[in-house]
Amino acid sequence: MQVADWRLVVQHRNNWRSLVSEVKIHFGSLSRRSGVWSLRNVSISVPRAVLSGDGQAAVLRCSYDLEGAQLYSIRWYRAETEFYRYVPRELPPSMVFPLPGASVDLTQSDHQQVRIVNLNRRLSGDYMCEVSADAPLFHTDIRTAPLTVVDPPFRAPRLSVSRDSYARGDVIRANCTVDEAYPAPNITWILDEHKIAETIPEPPAELDFTERGATSHLEITILETEQYKVGLTYTSASLGRVYRDYGYEPEPRKNHTTVRYTMVPPSSGQFELGCVTTIFDIYARKSAPVGIREDAPHPASVTGEDSSGTLPSGSLGLALCACALHLL
């Protein structure tokens, strides 16, 4: 073939590419003018967290509106790695790519969802759904959502207290410790079935799948009177949430690793302390509660009344005898 002939072929090829581009632009412009789009309302539904291990599964869903257009493909990615593809024109339409540490359940995966089974924590990260419409517009849209695969601690949290009895003015120290887990769990303090504070660890860095334990320290000061404000006096910088039903939240101070709490002794003279560990909304476990009681009765006043404002039984008997003698 001569040089002139090659030039003619290249010219025809360039003209064809220009024609295809013009057709796409024309259809796209026509679609915009008519207010009709072939792909709209793409959304993704991914569980925020799932448990790891055999038999555990996560169902990821992708919804969209093609407005009458044909679907070209659905592609699912973990980070930048494709692991599932659905192309209705192909036979079979579903295609699976290796996803180390898990597998795709093809019996429950299609153009709307993909089911992943037997996940491990290293598959935590961002999951992405890519939807593509067919010709002539070939619109494509992408949505992303995070998923955390949880390795929970093996045991319940362990609670220890410095003493199981108190006198007014005492300070009771308590520790709540949790075994290693991924991610590190939150610790919530419970006093008489009421939440008083929650410590929230720093989230793990990207690609850091190390299991970590957690510990929270609590100091409870038992007040002698009710004239002082009750609640949290100061907290550690890692304290993520306090519950205002039980106090106030001051500005956190640095270098403190202890939650400090002040309280008026309950009328019963005893209270119960516990802690709960949680990871998202899929894991929660409570420690064995510890009962703490007052170790000395309230002193009687000089008027002969006890702390409840009533006369002791012996004083009441003497008063009745004196009154009878007076009447005689």
Image (spheres, helix red, strand yellow):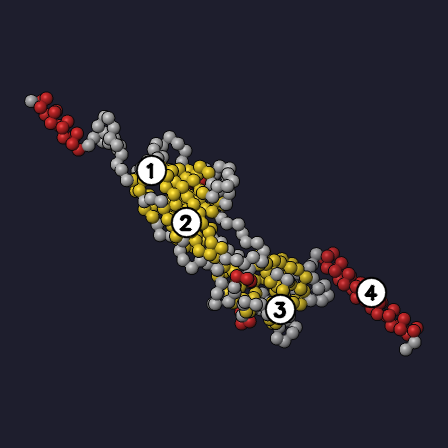
Q: In the figure, 155 relative to 74: above or below?
A: above
Disc 1 target residue: 265
> Closer to the N terminus: mark 4 or mark 1?
4
Q: Which of the 4 quarters of the picture holds residue 89?
A: bottom right
Q: Please provide percent x and percent y for residue 162.
A: 36, 44
> Closer to the N terminus: mark 1 or mark 3?
3
Q: Please provide percent x and percent y for residue 49.
A: 51, 58
In space, the residues marked 1 and 3 are separated at their CA atoms by 63 Å
Quarter of the figure with the C terminus: top left
Image check: 305 left or right of 2? left
- For the residue marked with disc 2, what is the amino acid? Cys
SS assignment at label 3: strand
Q: Please provide percent x and percent y for residue 269.
A: 29, 39
- For the residue marked with disc 1, what is the amino acid? Pro
Do the numbered discs 4 and 2 sit on residues whose CB atoms are within 8 Å?
Answer: no
Q: At 35% from the left edge and 50% from the top edge, which residue is drawn?
A: 289
SS assignment at label 4: helix
Q: At 55% from the left edge and 62% from the top edge, which residue is drawn?
A: 122
How many residues crowd mark 1 within 10 Å: few (<14), some (14–19), many (20+)?
many
Disc 3 target residue: 85
Q: At 74% from the left edge and 56% from the top edge, which residue is drawn?
A: 33
Do the numbered discs 4 and 3 sit on residues whose CB atoms are within 8 Å?
Answer: no
Front of the two marks 4 and 2: 2
Image check: 5 left or right of 221? right
Front of the two marks 2 and 1: 2
How many residues crowd mark 3 within 10 Å: few (<14), some (14–19), many (20+)?
many
Image check: 211 left or right of 206? left
> Closer to the N terminus: mark 4 or mark 3?
4
Residue 192 visible within the image = no
Disc 4 target residue: 18
Front of the two marks 2 and 3: 2
- For the residue marked with disc 4, what is the amino acid? Ser
